[in-house]
Image (cartoon, grey):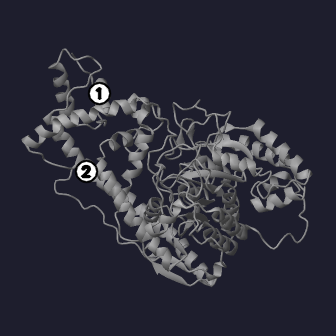
Amino acid sequence: MTLDRRGFLTACSRAGITSALLPGILYTLAAQAQEAAPEAKPHEQPKITAEMLDQAALLAGVGPFTAEQKKLMLDGLNDQRGSYEPIRALKLANSVPPAFVFHPLPAARAESDTEPAKDACADQKKALGEVIVGPGISSIPNSPAHIEDLAFASIGEIAELLEWKKVTAVALTKMYLARLKRYDSKLHFVITLMEERALAQARKADEEIAAGKYRGALHGIPWGAKDLLAVKGYPTTWGAGGFEHQSFDEDATVVERLDAAGAVLVAKFTLGALAMGDKWFGGRTRNPWNQEQGSSGSSAGSASAVAAGCVAFAIGSETLGSISSPSTRCGVTGLRPTFGFVPRTGAMALSWTMDKLGPISRSAEDCATILNAIYGPDGKDTAVANTDDVPMAFADWKKLRIGYLKSEFDPPAPLKLAEPKANETTEEKKKREDSNTQMREARARRDYDRRYELAALDKLRAMGVKLIPVELPKLPYDAMVPLLTAEAAAAFDDLTISGRDRLLTEQGIEDWPNAFRIARFYPAVEYIQANRARTLAIRQVSALFEQVDIIVTPSTDTQLIATNLTGHPALILPNGLRGADAPKPPAIDDGDHDDIGGPGTPVSLTFLAGHYQDAKLAAFASAYQKATGFHKLHPKLD
């Protein structure tokens, strides 16, 4: 009986051994094992042998085992492998979560999560309301000379006009639909245009407002959804090849809540395939400030469309940078809420313990308005906890204690360039010189952007803020990231097992198909150990917010990884535009870095806060935006 390489990989995948990088000996041994048992049926898997166990031990970083130990293990391993098939036969849908729930609060606070708190949502609504509600309208607003003058207006500005009937929701919706159609050919941010549904919602909004049934600041406001949110009657593609025609007979909770607020859903926006990057099955979503570059991801279309003035706001998601990164690249304001604040029911699951939904908009005030409509338990997403013991009352931002990650603003350490080696070949020399050139160029971009970060500290001091230096706890955050990949591999297990992962657009070393295969070698014990390390991170990062209320930081990787693991909220806001003297971007945008925009492109700043202190976060960010005005800048597209 023969076994070709494809058949071998399929068999190994069923055994929990799936990697395109398997040592050749595993293939040989498995083939020999099958040939040695000609009576075996085609669907039967070869037995795990001592030799295979040696190779697996190397991959798992354990052993070496003695011959006696291996003999004892083999029967158990073959029996354990038999437990995989009945579970796989269940064909678990992406929407089925594991039988555990992640809560990000330290132990002292998490104990109260089991107690229902009817007042918590009201307190949060009060807190967010105080962020967005001003002293009242002093005069009746004027109608715009041209409806397209509102393309880059804030939610608050548009809401006043709608409430005073100076503009109609239908006119706004038609304007944004026209802009989506006009600029999609350049920016590639639309997967599904929802014209019929949008116009019906807009007509209903106008009728209700005319009848005096005004629902609030989002009534009649057009918006777009990242296409991992289910909308009944429309495809939900997850941006991925092989899922182009997928649909669900339900609306995501966030969609239901925005419908109830009277907002008008006009489009479903692109995301990198299965929420990675900005490349999707239809191409690559572009940065409106530099259309030669991608918009970053994975909330690629949401950020690009908001930046281009094609919707008033959008909903994105973040697991590890998917709101932060495109907000930085596209110069918009993104709020990644506290984990467990916004229900994810009806959204694609990537990592049950890290996924978060949040708004992308023009300003921090807009983000607060949107969050006010979508937060709180829905009785379905069990990760959404009540917050009865967390203080929600909003205080004057001037009374908040403001910290900053000092080391992130300090000059970076000198570059360590590769030195020539003895007997270096011409190929090795070129590779070394190219690497050194890339490092020098990256440092030049970092040094340039640092000017904006230091200027932000100066501006905050000029606002009367006393900055308190703090540092993130020294923990191996990168070593905890495989938790995400392991959960993602489970969420999309069927892709790997069936081989349908070949339909995904990207197939490189860092892309999902390869990551899912590698994740199958992540030992269960190490997964649990990394979760225990994560508990330390939650405790220690949370302790920082006993010293300060807000932390100011560059939008760098370390804090982004740490706070996504710990579930703390972040608000990413534009912090100016690079000048004509900015270093040129690399010729190719590999999607790995957000700071490569070049002359005339945005830079960003990030504010962090304690768990469920999203209202304080929005209030402080709003004060900074009013003092700088960077959020009012927008790209010229024509």
Of marks 2 and 1, which one's residue comes earlier in the chain?
A: 1
Mark 1 belongs to which amino acid? Answer: Ala
Q: Position of residue 168 (x, y in %)?
A: 87, 50
Mark 2 belongs to which amino acid? Answer: Glu
Above or below: residue 525 compared with residue 547: above
The label nearer to you, 2 versus 1, is 1
On the rendered structure, is 606 left or right of 118?
left
How many residues crowd around disc 1 within 10 Å: few (fewer than 14), some, or many (20 or more)? many
Residue visible at 45% across and 41% down in the picture:
491
Q: Residue furthest front?
A: 115
Q: Position of residue 63 (x, y in %)?
A: 15, 48
| Viewer can see residue 430 | no
Q: Position of residue 231 (x, y in %)?
A: 66, 39
Above or below: residue 305 compared with residue 21: below
Residue visible at 41% across and 41% down in the picture:
490
Label 2 residue SS: helix
Q: Which residue is mark 2?
A: 428
Q: CA distance from mark 2 to mark 1?
A: 39 Å
Along the line of sight, the residue nearer the viewer: 425 or 207: 207
Residue visible at 37% across and 66% down in the picture:
536
Q: Which residue is mark 1?
A: 11
Above or below: residue 140 compared with residue 218: below
How many residues crowd around disc 2 within 10 Å: few (fewer than 14), some, or many (20 or more)? few
Count of marks overlaid on the render: 2
